[in-house]
Amino acid sequence: MASRGVVGIFLLSSIPILCLELRRGIPDLDEEEEKNEERQKLARKKQEDAQGEKVSRYLENVLKPHQEMKLKKMEERFYQMTGETWKLSNGHKLGSNEDVVLEDASQMSFETSNREAARRRNLPKSFTRVSPPVKQPPQKKVLDLPEEPPETAAEVVTVALRCPSGCVPRRRFFKSCSSQVLLDWMTKVGYPTSLYSLSTSFPRRPLEVEGSWTLEDIGITVDTVLNVEEKKQSS
């Protein structure tokens, strides 16, 4: 009995030593799990970065150009339906050419008057006494259009004239500008009010213009296309 007690005491005292040895031989599981989690996080981050880069390239190279092309086609279809295809072109600017035309007309009138005066001086005296006075041509009214406002100015509209010749001049005006300036501009372009009139595109109706009315009063509050039409001559 005494020997069994000694053996039991020896076994009990050796248990802590065995546990310590076992603990030294087994790797640290917690540290290994942390390393595995860190490796998994890095792998997931690389996958997410690669996926994000693919999405960005798709948006920039495929989706964005497709949307821009679709928007451009919709814009072209809209202007074709409203009869405002002139907005799709750059058009041409007015200015210096108009001044050259008026200047040439004035120069021709001046030269004609000089030739007439020289002819009268060369006639015999008997004829110069009875010749009627030369009727001077009436002075043409000088059309003075307001200065064209810049594109960035507020309360500005762009007006285009669809002329019988096919040209479509454009010009900017303030909405508060007198509506009479449209007729003056049409005359300066080369279509006098005695032979031509203005009408709206849609619905098609004659444009009513009064000196006391502004562009806003006659309904021109947005960019507009007006038709230059030849007046019907009364028989």
Image (cartoon, helix red, strand yellow):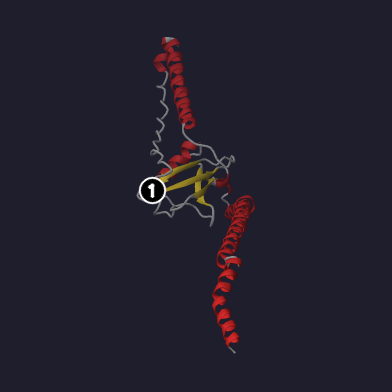
Instruction: Name the residue that disc number 1 marks.
Output: 154
Residue at horizontal 41 percent and vertical 14 percent from the top: 128
Q: Is residue 113 above or below residue 153?
A: above
Q: Nearer the viewer, residue 225 or 13?
A: 13
Q: Quadrant of residue 132?
A: top left
At label 1, the amino acid type is Ala
Q: Secondary structure at mark 1?
A: loop
Furthest residue toward left? 212
Q: Quadrant of residue 230?
A: top right
- Image position, residue 77 (x, y; %): 62, 54
- Image position, residue 146 (x, y; %): 38, 39
- Image position, residue 137 (x, y; %): 42, 28
Q: Nearer the viewer, residue 81 or 16?
A: 16
Q: Nearer the viewer, residue 117 or 139?
A: 139
Question: Dot 1, how many residues are within 10 Å of its Cα: few (below 14), some (14-19), or many (20+)?
Answer: few
Q: Is residue 187 above or below residue 50?
A: above
Whether residue 230 is visible here, answered yes or no, is: no
Q: Is residue 157 above or below residue 203?
A: above
Q: Is residue 37 left or right of residue 139?
A: right
- Image position, residue 94 (x, y; %): 48, 36
Residue at horizontal 59 percent and vertical 41 percent from the top: 166
Q: Quadrant of the N terminus?
A: bottom right
Furthest residue toward bottom? 1
Whether residue 169 is visible here, answered yes or no, is: yes
Q: Is residue 111 left or right of residue 40?
A: left
Furthest residue toward front? 2
Q: Nearer the viewer, residue 153 or 159?
A: 153
